[in-house]
Amino acid sequence: MKKNNLFSEFDPVTEKQWKQKIHADLKGADYNETLIWQSAEGIDVRPFYTAENDLETYSNSLAESWKLGQRISSGDNYPSDLETIVIKFSEAGEIPKALLEKAMSRGIFIHLEMDFLSQEFIARVEGIFRDYAHYALNIDLLGTLSRTGNWNKSNSEDHAILQFLLQHSKAPYVCAVDTGLFQNAGANRIQQLAYGLLQANEYLNFGVQHGLDPKPFVFKTAIDGNYFFEIAKLRALRWLWDTLAAEYGLDAPCHIIAEPSLRNKTTFDYNSNLLRTTLECMSAIQGGADTVVNRPYDSHFKYENEFSSRIALNQLRILKHESYLDKVNNPADGSYYIESLTEQLAQKALSLFKELEASGGYYQHLRSGMLQKKIREQAKAQEEDFDAGNEKLVGANAYVNEEESVLDQLDFAPFIQKEARRTEVEPIVPKRLASTVEKERMKDG
């Protein structure tokens, strides 16, 4: 039976015709001032996009393969339907052999997250893994330096351990890059992508200098509430990785872990965080993240607890098993808007990467304080938008319940705790957008 194409009855509408109609409807109002807005990345967002924009399609995300992930401590049991676990180690103590073997028997992907760097500890863990192919060490020397201001041990010792691991470890992924640190500190998406690419380049270049074959990376990302921009950000990240990897003769995709942002979470009206994290997880999935780990809605002011951890995982279960967001690959293909955002983010980030790489690379700019300064400037601009009400967070600066009190809900203060200590470089510090407003409200009871 011949299918009827209903759209064949209509003549195609050109971009020029759309603009003529819009100008007529505006009745003299300025098109650019009324309908075009500029993002923090300097991207002009237009009211419509068409095929005439001649955009490249960035088909590189496999939504059907994203995995349900959850952070667990080394002593935890975990739900049987988890597909990825991120195990946090705070010290080089006992290794949860039974937990690891149970995960291996189920084919679960295992991410290690260590607050230290110990060649001996990693050797013991890999003695358990043996030939298991689904794990990542996630060694991030520059990330540790950026976050804490200091190396794990020293520059030379840390890199000596990294060299050994790159040479001898069987892990599919040895190195990781945490772009979520930049996002949670207030960096825009161009900075997140460019700074992450700079770190990856330094690790790859280090391997080349020591005659080692390059390996793919894990990128840890934080997703905020701008749905389409965050989809485009992850797509741009894959394109940028593929571009960089090709320069080193590496033809292997990166592995992206995505998690909701901390920066836009609120303590007042904290249940709104459930809506924020759901939207952010959807962006991560549609953008092509390999693993999605949800952030419990109360994690910035309560200790880990069974209730909020279960709710966080249930959000992912609904997205996967009831919303069927694992059934379509490359869902953003053909969206003129998302393709345009992807291309602009990728090109702008690549330009910034080239500029910073030519003038010294990530470590040099971190040591000089330039990266921290640029992130602070971007964070300040965002905070000014928040204070002016242009950037809204329900419960913090919009629809505020003045009668609400949260003091009896807090397990710990949801604010940055400053620690006086000497550091080699100025650390990059995550800060929630609503923290200043919340602190003032809590002073008043």
Image (spheres, rainbow, N blue to C red):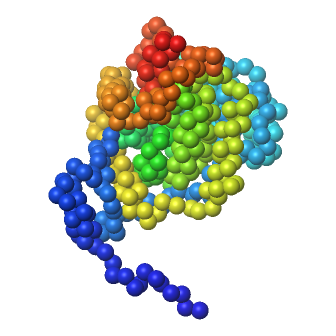
Q: How many marks?
A: 0
**Quick one: 87 or 203, which is closer to the camera?**
87
The residue furthest bottom is 1
Left or right of residue 104, residue 6 in this image: left
> Does residue 343 appear in the picture of this structure?
yes
Residue 87 sits in which quadrant? Answer: top right
**Quick one: 106 or 232, which is closer to the camera?**
232
Classify 359 as above or below 419: below
Classify 444 as above or below 218: above
Q: How far across and down, in percent of the image, does residue 112 sit?
A: 65, 33
Residue sitting at x 66%, y 28%:
88
Name the image quarter holding the N terminus.
bottom right
Q: How far across and down, in percent of the image, does residue 386 sit?
A: 37, 31
Q: How far across and down, in percent of the image, does residue 68 sit?
A: 67, 46
Residue sitting at x 63%, y 61%:
327
Residue sitting at x 55%, y 91%:
2
**Quick one: 211 or 151, which is closer to the camera?**
151
Residue sitting at x 65%, y 46%:
316
The residue furthest top is 420
The residue furthest front is 403
The residue furthest left is 28
Q: How far across and down, in percent of the image, does residue 436 sit?
A: 43, 20
Left or right of residue 225, residue 113 in this image: right
> Does residue 136 appear in the picture of this structure?
no
Classify 205 as above or below 333: above
Classify 36 as above or below 424: below
